Image (cartoon, coloured by chain):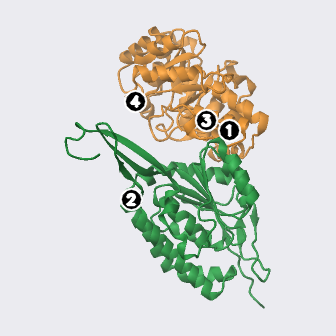
C-alpha cells in the first residue's frame, strides 16, 4: 500500500479534562424550546442510524426495522425518514432489498464486530462480503488490544486496509471509547482513525456498559475540527449507544454546532447510532403537537 | 438572644429519590398562628412527568412480585409508621390537629396499611370467578393491576390522606403518584421518608407537593397514566378531569369521596377493586362434561 498518500500523523494535543467537563455542563444547561425544539427533533430523526445488532436478529426483525425506518410513525407521515439502517453483514442483503429506492442507506458493522479480535484477512473478507451484499456504509471496530499495547501503527494500517476494502462505501471507525481509557487516549485514537482515512469516527459498539457520552464526543469533535482546519477535509461523527432520549440528542446537536458549525448539522456528517432514541423523539414531537405527555403504548415496538 | 429555628425543606419523592422540584419553586404553608411551617416544593408539570416515567418503569417489577411479598411490604410500612409515630403526631399537631386527633389519625393510618396488606393476596379470590361456558374451555376471570395510577389527596388529614390513596392502589400491583394536600403537606413527605426505608422499590410510590389545581390538567391529559383517583372537593376540577381523561380513556374515579377518611366504613376492598381491570382467560380442556364438572 502506498503510505505516501497519508499525511504524517501529528502528536495528539493533550486534552483539558476539566475544561471539557465545564463546556459540557454549559451545553447541558441550555434550554431549547418551541419551534427550535421541533426543528431539532426532526433533525435528530433524519440523523438516526436505526440499529439492530443482536444474536437473535431474524430476517423478519430486520424487515420490521426497515419498515419502521421508512415510516417512523403512521400519524405523522411528513416526518423525515432515518438516515440508515445498521445491521450485521448477514442481514445486509435483506435490508438492501427492503430499502430499495427509499434513499435510506444500509450500514453494516464488520471486522469481527464487536470485539475485533481476529486476523486482518478475515476482517477484510467480512468487509468485502458486506460491501458486495450492498452495504452503503461500513462500521468497523479498531483493534483495542493493539491500541492499548501501543501498536498504533498496526491500528493505523488496519484502518487504512479496511478503507481500501470498502471501495465506495463510507467507512465509520468505531473507537469503542469505553475500552481505550482516558480522554487523551480517545483523542489519540481519533487522530489515528481520521488520518488513516475514516469518513466517520464513532464512539462505541453499544455492546459494553460505557457507551457514548458528551465529553467523549466533545474530544472527538475537536479532533475532527483540527483536521478540518489543517486539511479542509470534513470527517463525520457518530455517537452510538446510550443516547435514548430526545433531550440528550438535542444537547449533542448543540455540541456539534458549537464545535464544528452548521456544515456538520446534516446526516452526511453527523449520525446517532441508536435503537430506542427514535421512539422518544417521536413522543416528544407528539407532545409538542398535541400538548399532552405521551405513552409508549401508542408507538411501535422497536 | 433567642435561637433562630431552622425550617426544614421538604423535597419531592420521585423514583426512590428525594429531588427538589425541577422548577426551583417553593411555598410556605402557614400554621394556625400564621407562621410558616416548612419550605415545601411547588411541583411542576415536569416533576409530574418525571414521576410518571419512574412509576411506569416500576410497574413490571412491582406487579410481578408475588401478592404475598407485596403484602409483606405493606405490612412493613405499617411497622415503620408505628416506630415513627411520635414524629408523625408532632407534625400533625403542627399542622392544626389536637393531640387526640393526631393520635387517632396515626392509629388509623397504621391500621389502614395493615388492612390493605391483608387484601393483597385475597382480593382476586373475592372478585375473581370461574365462568361457566358452553365449550371445552376452562374459563376464569381475575383482576389485574392497571399500571400507573395518580391520586389527588383531600385537603384534610395530612397523613391519612396519602395513606388512604396509596395503600389500596399499590396493593394490587399498581404504581402510584400522589399529589399531597396543599395546606397540610408535611406528613406526606415524612411518609415518603418512611416508605423509603420500608422495602418499597423506588418508583412504586411517588409523592408530589404543590398545587393540585395546577397539575390536574397535565395529569388528566397524560397518555401514560392509566387511572386517576380524585379526592379533592372542587366540582369544576372534577368535571374538567373527566374531559381531559378522554384522550386515552383513562379511568377516573372518585370512589369514597362521599365518606370521611376517618369513617368506619371507609375501608373496603371495593376501593382496591376500583383500580384493577378484569382479565378473562380461556384455557382449552378436554371434552366438556367428561370430568363431570359444570364448568
- State the separation of the CA atoms marked 2 and 3: 46 Å
Residue drawn at the location 68% of the way across and 19% of the way down: A231
Query: Which one is earlier in the sequence, the residue at label 4 or at label 1?
Result: 4
Q: Which numbered mark, 4 or 1, is in the foreground of this view?
A: 1
Residue highlighted by disc 1:
A251
Vertical arrangement, residue A294 with respect to residue B229, above or below: above
Q: Could you tell me residue B150's position as x and y percent?
A: 60, 56
Secondary element at image label 3: helix
Task: Tell which of A185 and A276 is nearer to you.
Answer: A276
- State the separation of the CA atoms marked 2 and 1: 43 Å
Q: Circle 3 marks a residue in which chain? A: A
Residue A84 appearing in the image: yes
* Residue density around tag 2, few if under 14, some if 14–19, many if 20 or more, within 10 Å: many
- State the separation of the CA atoms marked 3 and 4: 21 Å
As drawn, the chain in orange is A
Q: Which numbered mark, 2 or 4, is in the foreground of this view?
A: 2
Amino acid at each position: 500500500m502506498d503510505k505516501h498518500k497519508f499525511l504524517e500523523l501529528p502528536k495528539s494535543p493533550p486534552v483539558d479534562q476539566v475544561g471539557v467537563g465545564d463546556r459540557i455542563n454549559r451545553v447541558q444547561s441550555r434550554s431549547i424550546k418551541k419551534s427550535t425544539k421541533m426543528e431539532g427533533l426532526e433533525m435528530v430523526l433524519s440523523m438516526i442510524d436505526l440499529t439492530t445488532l443482536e444474536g437473535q436478529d431474524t430476517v423478519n426483525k430486520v424487515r420490521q426495522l426497515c419498515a419502521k425506518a421508512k415510516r417512523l410513525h403512521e400519524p405523522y407521515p411528513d416526518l423525515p425518514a432515518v438516515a440508515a439502517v445498521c445491521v450485521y453483514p448477514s442481514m445486509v442483503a435483506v435490508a438492501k432489498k427492503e430499502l430499495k429506492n427509499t434513499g435510506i442507506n444500509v450500514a453494516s458493522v464488520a471486522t469481527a464486530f464487536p470485539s475485533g479480535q481476529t486476523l486482518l484477512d478475515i476482517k477484510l473478507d467480512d468487509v468485502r462480503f458486506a460491501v458486495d451484499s450492498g452495504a452503503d456504509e461500513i462500521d468497523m471496530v479498531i483493534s483495542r488490544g493493539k491500541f492499548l499495547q501501543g501498536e498504533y501503527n498496526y491500528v493505523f494500517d488496519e484502518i487504512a486496509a479496511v478503507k481500501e476494502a470498502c471501495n465506495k462505501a463510507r467507512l465509520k471507525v468505531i473507537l469503542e471509547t469505553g475500552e481505550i481509557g482516558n480522554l487523551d487516549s480517545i483523542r489519540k485514537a481519533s487522530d489515528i482513525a481520521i488520518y488513516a482515512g475514516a469518513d466517520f469516527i464513532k464512539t462505541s459498539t453499544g455492546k459494553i456498559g460505557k457507551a457514548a457520552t458528551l465529553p467523549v464526543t466533545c474530544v472527538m469533535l475537536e479532533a475532527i475540527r483540527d483536521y478540518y482546519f489543517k486539511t479542509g477535509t470534513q470527517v463525520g461523527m457518530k455517537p452510538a449507544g446510550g443516547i435514548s432520549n430526545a433531550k440528550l440528542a438535542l444537547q449533542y446537536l448543540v455540541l456539534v454546532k458549537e464545535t464544528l458549525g452548521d456544515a456538520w448539522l446534516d446526516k452526511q456528517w453527523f449520525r446517532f447510532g441508536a435503537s430506542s432514541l427514535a421512539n422518544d423523539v417521536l413522543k416528544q414531537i407528539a407532545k409538542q403537537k398535541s400538548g399532552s405527555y405521551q405513552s409508549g403504548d401508542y408507538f411501535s415496538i422497536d | 438572644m433567642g435561637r433562630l429555628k431552622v425550617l426544614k425543606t421538604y423535597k419531592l419523592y420521585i423514583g426512590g429519590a428525594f429531588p427538589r422540584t425541577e422548577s426551583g419553586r417553593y411555598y410556605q404553608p402557614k400554621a394556625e398562628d400564621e407562621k410558616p411551617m416548612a419550605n415545601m416544593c411547588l411541583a411542576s408539570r415536569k416533576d409530574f412527568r418525571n414521576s410518571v416515567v419512574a412509576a411506569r418503569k416500576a410497574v413490571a417489577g412491582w406487579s410481578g412480585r408475588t401478592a404475598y411479598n407485596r403484602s409483606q411490604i405493606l405490612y412493613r410500612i405499617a411497622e415503620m409508621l408505628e416506630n415513627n409515630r411520635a414524629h408523625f403526631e408532632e407534625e400533625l399537631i403542627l399542622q392544626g390537629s389536637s393531640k387526640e386527633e393526631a393520635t387517632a389519625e396515626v392509629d388509623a393510618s397504621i391500621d389502614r396499611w395493615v388492612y390493605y396488606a391483608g387484601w393483597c393476596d385475597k382480593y382476586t379470590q373475592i372478585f375473581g370467578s370461574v365462568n361457566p361456558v358452553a365449550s371445552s374451555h376452562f374459563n376464569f376471570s381475575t383482576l389485574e393491576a392497571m399500571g400507573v395510577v395518580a391520586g389527588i389527596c383531600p385537603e384534610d388529614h395530612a397523613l391519612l390522606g396519602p395513606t388512604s390513596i396509596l395503600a389500596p392502589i399499590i396493593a394490587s400491583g399498581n404504581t402510584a403518584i400522589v399529589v399531597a394536600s396543599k395546606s397540610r403537606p408535611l406528613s406526606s413527605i415524612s411518609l415518603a421518608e418512611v416508605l423509603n426505608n420500608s422495602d418499597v422499590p423506588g418508583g412504586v410510590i411517588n409523592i408530589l407537593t404543590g398545587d393540585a389545581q395546577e397539575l390536574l390538567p397535565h395529569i388528566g391529559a397524560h397518555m401514560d397514566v392509566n387511572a386517576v383517583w380524585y379526592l379533592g372537593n372542587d366540582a369544576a376540577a372534577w368535571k374538567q378531569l373527566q374531559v381531559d381523561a378522554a384522550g386515552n380513556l383513562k379511568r377516573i374515579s372518585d370512589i369514597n369521596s362521599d365518606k370521611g377518611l376517618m369513617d368506619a366504613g371507609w375501608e373496603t376492598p371495593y376501593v382496591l377493586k376500583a383500580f384493577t381491570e378484569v382479565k378473562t382467560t380461556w384455557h382449552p380442556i378436554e371434552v366438556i362434561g367428561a370430568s363431570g364438572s359444570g364448568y
